[in-house]
Amino acid sequence: MIDPTQFRAWEHVMNHRNILLSALATVVALASVLPCGARASDDAPAAVLEHNKSVARQVYEEGLNQGRFDVPYTADFVGHGGTRTFTHAEGMAEAKGWRAAFPDLNMQVDKLLAEGDLVAVRWTARGTNTGSGNGIPVTGRAVEITGTTLFRMAEGRIAEEWTCANSLGLMRQLGMLPTSAAAPAAGGAANSGSR
């Protein structure tokens, strides 16, 4: 069992990390500050921007919502999630794992912005954990989390992806984190129940 003090400290760090990463992805998309050496072409025609937004939307509406993974990716696609990178095959395996764990998964696109070769998506995921996948056992619990994904496009295909989601909130909603001990009563003494 995790020490409640250590757990609260870890939880605090994870909450701030997710907030900061989500804010960073939004700033990157809006300010055209490009991560990992990505290049933007600021003179992308409106038709290209609309096509790129359509491909990004397809990830959620067809892939994650319907299990139809026909989204175009480049052969040298690289994904970034937290401190790790992943290939297209690894990303598809994870997406299928989420669909297995949450058969009723619904990914709602809340905001969609495109500039140059970048598309930023703010999304909300909802589902009920009635299956197992990605290391998550069946809990029967309904969850709702938000996240932000930044895609870099190349010739109408997804070439790179950065995703930040509320993983701590997901684990909490699934009941997979220990509950914190009740705080002591004022003055540091526990309430004995007698008055």
Image (cartoon, rainbow, N blue to C red):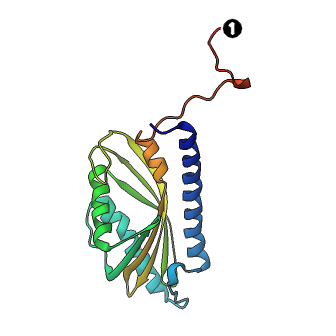
Name the amino acid, label 1. Arg
Q: Is residue 103 visible?
A: no
Above or below, comparing residue 151 to residue 67 in the picture: below
Residue 180, given in percent of the width and then of the height, sits at 53, 34
| Mark 1 residue element | loop
According to the image, label 1 marks what residue?
195
Q: Nearer the viewer, residue 195 or 159?
A: 195
- Dot 1: few (<14), some (14–19), or many (≥20) neighbours within 10 Å? few
Above or below, comparing residue 117 to residue 89 in the picture: below
Residue at horizontal 48%, vertical 83%? 117
Q: Nearer the viewer, residue 97 or 83?
A: 83
Q: Nearer the viewer, residue 159 or 13?
A: 13
Residue at horizontal 53%, vertical 42%? 7
Residue 188, given in percent of the width and then of the height, sits at 70, 25
Q: Is residue 167 visible?
A: yes
Residue at horizontal 55%, vertical 63%? 22
Q: Is residue 55 left or right of residue 191?
A: left
Q: Is residue 153 left or right of residue 26?
A: left
Q: How many marks?
A: 1
Residue 147, given in percent of the width and then of the height, sits at 48, 59
Residue at horizontal 33%, vertical 67%? 91
Above or below, comparing residue 5 to residue 162 in the picture: above
Above or below, comparing residue 192 to residue 164 in the picture: above
Residue 63, given in percent of the width and then of the height, sits at 31, 65
Q: Quadrant of the N terminus?
A: top left
Q: Nearer the viewer, residue 139 or 61?
A: 139
Which residue, as the protein is rendered here, is positioned at the far top? Answer: 195
